[in-house]
Amino acid sequence: MTEVATGAAVIRGVGDVEDFARECFAPAPGNRVGVELEFLVFDRADLDAHVPVTRTRRALAEFLDGAGLPGGSAVTFEPGGQVELSAPPAALPEAIRGVAADVEAVRGALADAGLILAGVGLDPVRPPLRQSRQPRYAAMAEFLDPDAGPLMMCSTASIQVNVDLGERPAQRWERAHALGPVLTAAFANSPLCRGRPCGWMSGRQEVWERLDRSRTAPVAGAGDPALAWARYLLDARVMLRRDGDGGCRAVRDGSTFRDRLASPGPPPTYADLAYHATTVFPPVRPRGWLEIRCLDAQRLAYWPVVVAVTHALVTDDRAGDAAVAAAEPYRDAWRDAARRGLAHPGLRRAADACFAAALGALPRLGAPGDLLARVAAFADRHVSTGRSPAADLLDAGRWTPDGA
């Protein structure tokens, strides 16, 4: 996957922003998938305690200090100490194998240190606690809603599926948006917050709903996706500005990037615009590939299902057409998907059709038999019954992570 080029050239007007947005959609033949997994970390002996990120780093030192992970994933940490694994793009079977090896290596190292790698979209028991003091995160904390902002930064975990744009980027962009609510419902896995039901199957998505909607709402507009993305970037509020010494300051006056273009003073550069694009968080974001960002983290057995189903439905034409036909009536049902998950009858029916389409496509994409079996088992347990993974967490009473 190729990153959009950026630089110090000055942006003179809306046309330059449109040119930047068009680069984000440059056709890129291929069907690779990139995987980014976030996990919460818990102390096996005290699930209510925050784990200092320094302790997590010590446990993973062998992977951070040069040896690396066996599948090539990079290890980073979110502001609350969440572990993120970012894998290089590959064909689906190789991507799943590589990330699985990396997840197992990280899980094992943490287990040896008395820590648990937990796949759940929103911290079920602990209040948010920001551990990173990086300037970017300090400025984000100042900018964002004082309740939802800390939760988003410190208490959430997601699965991000990155797919090549292919030869027809607009088609894959359209599919990803049409399928987003159904996938959100199918994989909703965050119904608890601070020890109690939060009223949503995907409490993580509800947290995003409460943030600045100029940067978290889906990108709107039919037709040319590059023009829609340019409008989104222009109309999103500027979150922060960087200084020359590596610092950041929050922008609190409500100004948008469009306002910045018209304001007196030095005009923004392409580098400024590219950085602004990293501070907007729609459910689907183009970066020279498509980032599908609306999916809750899952228990360790299920993350391959999320990756396989999402990748198959966006990249395989036969599966994608069938899935979109089923999902089309619910393309705007983001809120229902997050609140009710697969308890919503229409979303459950659409998810049934989507999983059937994905199971038909996965052999064409080289998926091995064990992955097909895992997808089918998830469909039987959760989709056919209308029970998102969140329902299991609600039924369990007190939450306990895998391996506790």
Image (cartoon, rainbow, N blue to C red):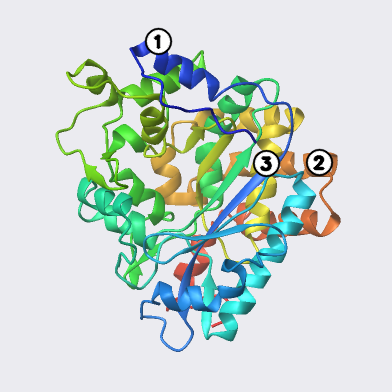
At label 1, which amino acid type do we have? Gly
Q: In which quarter of the image is residue 258?
A: top left
* Residue shown at 26% from the left, 54% from the top: 138
* Element under disc 3: helix
- The reply, left or right, for residue 10 in relation to residue 308 is left
Q: In which quarter of the image is residue 161?
A: top right
N-terminal-most mark, 1 or 2: 1
Q: Position of residue 102 (x, y in %)?
A: 67, 64
Q: Position of residue 242 (x, y in %)?
A: 29, 40
Which one is in front in this view, the residue at disc 1 or the one at disc 3? 1
> How far apart in space, not on screen, are marks 1 and 2 (Cα)?
39 Å
At label 2, which amino acid type do we have? Leu
Query: Which residue is at the front of the view, 69 or 93?
Result: 69
Q: Is residue 348 visible?
A: yes
N-terminal-most mark, 3 or 2: 3
Q: Mark 2 points at which residue?
A: 365
Q: Do the residues labelled 3 and 2 touch (CB within 8 Å)?
A: yes
Q: Quadrant of the N terminus?
A: top right
Which one is in front in this view, the residue at disc 1 or the one at disc 2? 1
At label 3, which amino acid type do we have? His
In the picture, the disc for residue 311 is 3
Q: Say above or below: 60 vs 253.
A: below
> How far apart in space, not on screen, are marks 1 and 3 (Cα)?
33 Å
Q: Name the residue under label 1.
A: 15
* Residue shown at 62% from the left, 50% from the top: 35
Q: How crowded is mark 3: few (under 14 residues within 10 Å), some or many (20 or more)?
A: many
Q: Are marks 1 and 2 in contact (CB under 8 Å)?
A: no
* Element under disc 1: helix
